Image (tube, rainbow, N blue to C red):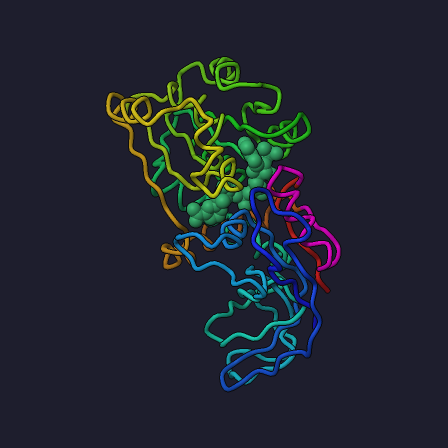
Amino acid sequence: MKRIVLASRPDGAPTADNFRLEEGPVPTPGDGEVLVRVKYMSLDPYMRGRMDDAKSYAAPVPVGGTMEGGSVGEVIASNSPDFKPGDHAFGMLGWATHGVLPANQLRKVDPDQVSITTSLGVLGMPGFTGWQGLMEYGRPKEGETLVVAAATGPVGSMVGQIAKSHGLRVVGIAGGADKCAMAKEHFGFDECIDHRAYDDAKSLRAALKDACPKGIDIYFENVGGKVLEAVIPMMNPHGRIPICGMIAWYNAGGLGAGAAEEALTAPKLWRTILVNFLSVNGFIISNHWNNFPKFLKEVAPKVADGTIAVKEDITEGLENAPQAFMDLLTGGNQGKAIVKVG
Ligand code: NDP
């Protein structure tokens, strides 16, 4: 089997040197365990956090350890009555061609319903994140205005589409004209603003004012940085901000040097939250898995009948995963980033 390990910890943006491809024997499943041959692997922004040895909500990947990640593949050996060879399953199998997990850590996926790749994006962790964060912390109401950045990714595109189905005005922020066209034409956003076309928060805010004439009621926070700074003064009283991610700062160690460059100081931010009675809720999706069946029940039929649009960006070959991951962090992906492994 092949796997990609963390060769060294990055200092700032990851480079190819931080990853190493290794080969070894295919693992043997023990009692109650299942061996899966991976077909598709997910690339997600949270993996950048796992590369740092910093205090976080999840343990870091050790240097020399297999990069963490979710994959979907075919069962080729099983010591559990719950799985048989030929079944398809999703699990945290890492950046590898094969993986073994206890049966209770695998979720069966039916390839006859929808493409198995959807278990990594629109019907997996990221899609669930968008749906859960919006419904629980965004509390959308008809006629309101929502803004979300990384609008064409699996989280942002779910947020936009669900908000639209609840009758909101939905404004996306994305990197580049092509992604903005995708947000509007493929995902049905009312407007989309190219954050790369604006040098600073002030000019980005001017564009947002045109797109959001009634201000912003929900800002679904995916990115931080310049976008956050542009949005905050536009929040309406009683607005909601589900804090999902802050990818603009991930290469700065989450709260490091890059964050300090933003002019949005803590007193200014705090005052806006106070005087506009904002609800700001951070959340980590791993604390919400009990709601996943409800999400699937509601959203899977909409994916199957095309009501919810999907966009996937598939890279061929495990050996190309590091480059595809580095591209994801800088916006090189066009839709949900996936690697075709085997
Ligand atoms: P995407 O597939 O959308 O990829 C990340 C995107 O972020 C890039 O394509 C790029 O899009 C955008 N981006 C990168 N840098 C910047 C920047 N400086 N300013 C603005 N945008 C930037 O990712 P996901 O949909 O998988 O994830 C979206 C967010 O949700 C991430 O922050 C992620 O960490 C978070 N998340 C949080 C979870 C939780 O439990 N809280 C669970 C899952 C995801 P563009 O080119 O359009 O700018």
**Any part of residue 195 in sight:** yes
Classify residue 329 by image quadrant: top right
Please tell me whether residue 223 is drawn above or below residue 16 in the rendered image: above
Q: Where is 22 relative to 277, above or below?
A: below
Give the side of residue 329 with respect to residue 239, left or right: right
In percent of the image, x 63 and y 59: which residue is there? 41
**Residue 123 falls left or right of residue 294:** right
| Residue at 69% in and 75% down | 24
Q: Tell me which segment is drawn in magenta.
A: 313-332
Magenta stretch: dominant secondary structure = helix
Considering depth in this image, is 254 or 275 the residue closer to the camera?
A: 254
306 left or right of 271?
A: right
Q: Nearer the viewer, residue 31 or 260?
A: 260
Across and down, in percent, residue 35 comes to: 60, 77
User: Which residue is depicted at the point 33% across and 25% down?
Assistant: 269
In the rendered view, does 272 fall on the left or right side of 296?
left
The percent position of residue 249, horizontal first and vertical second, equals 49, 37
Looking at the rendering, in which quadrant would you find the N terminus? Answer: bottom right
Foreground of the two, 295 or 40? 40
Viewer can see residue 158 = no
Q: Quadrant of the C terminus?
A: bottom right
Vertical arrangement, residue 20 with respect to residue 176, above or below:
below
Residue 152 x %, y %: 59, 36
- Based on the picture, tell me whether residue 324 belongs to the magenta stretch: yes
Number of marks present in the image shown: 0
Name the residue furthest right: 316
Q: Give me the residue at 49% from left, 33% from top.
A: 258
40 over 143 or under it: above or below: below
The quarter holding residue 166 reads top left
**Foreground residue among 30 and 167:** 30
Q: Residue 10: percent from the left, percent from the top?
A: 57, 49
Question: Does the stretch in magenta take in 309?
Answer: no
